[in-house]
Image (spheres, rainbow, N blue to C red):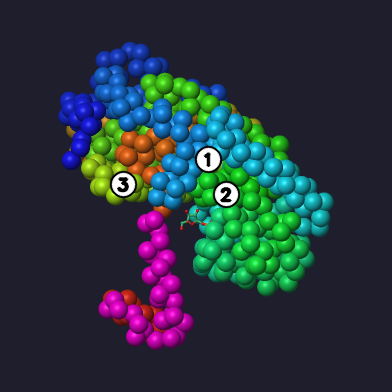
Amino acid sequence: MRIAPSWQSLSAHAARLCESRLAELVAADGARARDFSVRVGALYGNFSRQRFDRDAHAALVAMANEAGVPAALQALFEGDPVNRSEHRAALHTALRSDLGRSEAARSAHAQARAARERMAALAAALESSDITDVVNVGIGGSDLGPRLAADALGDFGSGRFRLHFLNNADAHPLQRLLRELDPARTAVVLVSKSFGTQETLLNGTALKQWLRRDDALYAVTAAPSKAEAFGVASERVLPMWDWVGGRYSLWSAVGFAVVLAIGMSRFEELLAGAAEMDAHVLSAAPESNLACWHALSLVWNRNGLGFDTHAVMPYDERLALLPAYLQQLVMESLGKSVRPDGTEVEVATVPVLWGGTGTSSQHSFFQALHQGTDSVPTDFVGVARPAHGFEGSHRAQLANLLAQMEALANGADSDDAQKRYPGNRPSTLLLLDELTPHSLGALLALYEHSVFVLATLWGINAFDQWGVELGKRVADKLLPALNGDGSQGVADPVTRELLAQIRGGS
Ligand code: F6P
């Protein structure tokens, strides 16, 4: 065991504060509501409803400094091989910022700009064609980011194309989609960093056969020769690179669908918002750094107070896909229990991340947040000014958001045990002035950097995902049995029985 002094200090503060009440912490420190906050442009974060006090927060900041967070961030931006198991850089920041001074970072930035020029040209050609529908075929990072951004920012677009997203191996969505599309007016974009992902190749092959022409096939990939072998002409293959992780790739040509939805200049605004967050995160000391405040709150809840889930609740339907996007970003990045050197991490790492939109979630699972046995630390994501004219609805939306945070924190007593609310449940507010490409870019970059700070504190690699490989290998081995080649080769008795049930299922 090599528990660093700052982790011992965290435990001591957690022991001191574990019985403390949020309402008392707030009452005892009149400036807390204002001081426990950071604004970066159009994005404001307030952490005063986290159950730490100033001393505990100072200990968390000391922990970030002891773990070398500022230097680690610098190394990330410079393109050091932070993805140690794959000996790669993670230069997603270079897709939108030119803050890295190294040759690797500058070259990455230049390649990203060149790719954007090609993307703009392909988008312009599509706009002047007869194409009415575009299908983005991809999964994980090749789906969640572009789908979230296209959905969230749809109002900024001209609606020139109807966009569709096909992701997983279930062909029911494919079948439904083909019923409504015309192959003469449809373009298909295969998005796959590896161009070896089973689900994407299954859907892509079916669509290619249905299209019966290759001039409407596009690809975004770091394996262009595989895309060309599949039948995509090289002039319609946009690049990706091994120095960008799939779940960090929205800012690259993986965002082609977003460009088709909102246009290139709006896409550039998305990148500019992320770049604004990059500049803040790289330059601000941990005590005034929004990503550090966010990550340290998670560490406090996970490692100090022992909470094992974390919820994200956008109070804006345009952000409905945010929890799903963050599940991959956070849980694929931080779902690790060994360090790059193979030693075990001594502390708990990623919490289970989940969520849904307010106010509808209030009428389903918020009961458990208020009166269940577990506290669920929650990020409330709000938008101060709506993009619609129904002001009464928006005021109600915001009243509900503020009310939930207050009720979760303060609770309420009653003589009737059924009507007692324990309160003391922590939350953070992330408030956008408005939902724009710029503010969405800043919000997503904030989460990316928070993930990296957490990985640095826990000593794990945020950029590999070996955990998903075993299941893929087992599925490959089982496919012959499902193809009817017998289950003799299937060693696991439970799987053999389940296969028999599937074959003879009543
Ligand atoms: O299996 C997980 C994963 O590798 C993700 O990390 C990635 O975003 C997704 O699959 C899709 O991969 P690709 O873009 O190579 O098709």
Magenta stretch: includes residue 303 = no
Marks 3 and 1, Cα distance to the nearest angstrom? 22 Å
Q: Is residue 59 visible?
A: yes
Q: In screen coordinates, is 198 left or right of 257?
A: left
How many residues crowd mark 3 within 10 Å: few (<14), some (14–19), many (20+)? few
Q: In screen coordinates, is 92 left or right of 323?
A: right
Marks 2 and 1, Cα distance to the nearest angstrom? 9 Å
Residue beneath the point at 57% across and 66% down: 201
Whether label 2 touches label 1, CB < 8 Å: yes
Q: Nearer the viewer, residue 455 or 114?
A: 114
Provide residue 314's location: percent of width, then percent of height: 47, 39
* Residue 478 figure quarter: bottom left
Is 483 located above or below residue 297 in the figure? below
Mark 3 vs mark 2, foreground winner is 3
Look at the numbered disc 1 and give the secondary structure of its residue: loop
Provide residue 233's location: percent of width, then percent of height: 72, 62
Whether label 3 touches label 2, CB < 8 Å: no
Residue labelled with disc 3? 341
Dominant SS of magenta comes to helix
Provide residue 499's location: percent of width, then percent of height: 36, 80
Residue beneath the point at 35% across and 82% down: 489
What amino acid is labelled 1 in the image?
A: Leu
What amino acid is labelled 2 in the image?
A: Trp
Is 81 located above or below residue 498 in the figure? above
Placement of the N terminus among the 4 image quadrants: top left
Look at the numbered disc 2 and give the secondary structure of its residue: loop
Q: Which residues are magenta?
A: 466-493
Q: Is mark 3 within 8 Å of ligand 1?
A: no
What amino acid is labelled 3 in the image?
A: Asp
Give the mark, 3 or 1, whose residue is nearer the N terminus: 1
Residue labelled with disc 1? 91
Marks 3 and 2, Cα distance to the nearest angstrom? 25 Å
